[in-house]
Amino acid sequence: MTSFDLQEIMAGVLAGRRIGPDEAWALYEEAGCHELGLLAHRRRLSRHPEPVVTYVVDRNINYSNVCACGCRFCAFFRPPGHPEGYVLSRADLAQKIEETLSLGGTQILMQGGHHPDLPLSFYEDMLRFIKERYPIHIHAFSPPEIVYFARLEGLDAAAVIARLRAAGLDSIPGGGAEILVDEVRRRVSPNKCSAGEWLGVMEEAHRQGLRTTATMMFGHEEEPRHRLDHLFALRELQDRTGGFTAFIPWAFQPRNTAIPRLPETAVSYLRLLALSRLVLDNFDNIQASWVTMGPKVAQTALLFGANDFGSTMIEENVVAAAGVHFRLSADEIRRIIRSAGFEPRQRTMAYEWIDGDSGQ
Amino acid sequence: MLDGNWYKQVGLGPIYEKVLGGERLSLDDGERLFACPDTVAVGALAHHVRRRLHGLSAFYVMNQHINYSNICVNGCRFCAFHRNRGEAGAFELTIEDVLAKAREREGEALTEIHIVGGCHPDLSLDYFEALLRRIKELRPGLILKAFTAVEIAHFAKREGLTSREVLVRLRDAGLDMLPGGGAEIFSPRVRSLLCPEKLSGEGWLDIVREAHGMGIRTNATMLYGHLETPRERLEHLDALRRLQDETGGFVCFIPLPFQPGNTQVEGVRPTTGVDDLKTIAVSRLMLDNLPHIKAYWVMLTVKLAQVALLFGADDFDGTIIEEKIGHMAGAESEQSLTRSDLERVIREADLEPVERNSFFERVR
């Protein structure tokens, strides 16, 4: 790749042209960090000309940490039968939701593990229990959970999604995507659903009218080219369905996991984030991850392609299990957004601004 | 891509031309840079200057910090480190205590010991002379970078000596260099609010001028993100720039974001990452005669300090052990870094790690 080609590619990006895998690779390998950031920020501003950065007030509720999957990168799960395994009681669930609502929360992100003993009716009952009592958006059950539920019940994923939806599921979080390349998944999460299954659940969910997000966890045992494969797989699906609301890349946190390595650095994170904005030209929203990168770098990410600051995370357990603890209030998130030169707006899962929130 | 047109589009065309032509930026230019929302473009310009000066080298030092005491008569409101004598948490190390700390790291290939403390009401110049002599005896090869200009002024006042006499005696005892602390913000308006008891900005500059005149090199700092305006930051940078024109004695500039935890400054929140990066970039662009800009990871966090190496900073400081001043004010960074941690972080930013000593001479 000559620098002339790189200049051409950058000019193409500025002109709003779609980039292919070779061009994306050239940018990722050859472009300077500033150039990637500036290109991504231009793209972000052309998609969202208003100087707004959104955030959501929600809570991560992990209904269980019991998981038969045993992914090597996970510090959160406990295998079935382990004394530290738990399933949240209804009373605890109710208390957590009430607290979320009292803090101005609009949604819960609810995920667990692959619990071998809970039937699909357990999840349906849990959704109904919540919906009967609380006016709250339920963003729950990542594709690996749905695939696992289907396997346990002898159903297909479409039937599971339909039943969960009928019981009150509002949208599906993009977790469990890790790296959407099977040779990587076989190494780091051999018992988890395949890349094709993950994408299949999302396609079916979109077909049934559920919106979803998409994530990427990078910096474990994948090669850099696998990150690009992941982005292009998402872009291809989004071209067909338009059902993804947002993309959320985050860096693997190795502490307390079975993958010994050092965490990705901030520069590596910002480069990948910028590249995501450039490749995912059909995604509206790219989210910064303060939970893994800390507030200072997450704020910087708002100039590298991100337009969303994520969630207040009233509760977060999975990253915390890997020894990373950052805390931010909604007030602090608004201040950080303003200090980067943007207007903060609280949003819903569908990225609609919440009426009456003047960003004060 | 990052050409004159790009800078014209973000309103920095004339500044871009000046920077490329090696022309000095005015305070008004500095205000324009602070006001520009395109922080990455400002950072890229600072990175251009940094590359012109240092190529892709990113420096670090293998050093040890020792705080001999936190007892201080100044009571600066921004400081979470100081204590009054007899107050809970007050400490004062004997010379033997300090030597014991130095001995703990005797097996390590350090090049520098950084020693600062409070303005202690009772410790005499004899104590500090003995401190330097004994450490020099223990580790003769190490550079002793010790005592801010504020401490020098305090010693002089306490002993009834001139600051020059103090510097001569300390140099004879083994002092090699002064760190840059105590500069805070030179603005008399802000100093009267934050640290009325402390040496004035003029006083700080006078002592540093004196040290430079004696061949003692120093660093310089700026504490920002409290009550100062962007203009006051720029005036601070300009004062350093003018003194550097006169003496050439500054080695490295260290912008320090104010950490409000456990201090008496109310209603101020910590600086944000974008402000930190912008301040480093503007410092690089304004301080055209100061060779080095430090990304002090203790205050910035390691993650942001790495990004700062692409926004005008060329130094990552060092493998500090037992940092107290920033951490007592709530700094969320790590307590120490190993050499391999430091080198990896630098390489991951596509830069080349270079170990340096206090004077930025290559160690290897």
Image (spheres, rainbow, N blue to C red):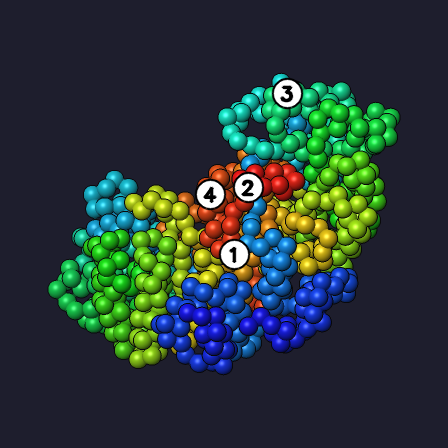
- First in sequence: mark 3 vs mark 2: 3
Return the x and y of residue A127 as percentages of the image width and height. 29, 63
Residue A359 visible:
no
Q: Which residue is mark 3?
A: B137
Mark 2 vs mark 1: in front: 2
The quadrant of the rendering that contains the N terminus of chain B is bottom right
Q: Which residue is mark 1?
A: A297
The furthest residue to the left = A154
Mark 4 vs mark 2: in front: 2
Q: Mark 2 Cα within 10 Å, few/some/many (few <14, many 20+)?
A: many
Label 1 resides on the chain identified as A
Label 2 resides on the chain identified as B
Residue drawn at point x = 84 percent, y = 28 percent: B165
Q: Mark 4 Cα within 10 Å, few/some/many (few <14, many 20+)?
A: few
- First in sequence: mark 3 vs mark 4: 3
Q: Which mark is residue B117?
A: none
Return the x and y of residue B176 as percentages of the image width and height. 70, 32
Instruction: Look at the numbered disc 3 and give the secondary structure of its residue.
Output: helix
Q: Quadrant of residue B274?
A: bottom right
User: Could you tell me the amino acid type at mark 4?
Assistant: Asp
Residue B313 visible:
yes
Q: Which mark is residue B355?
A: 2
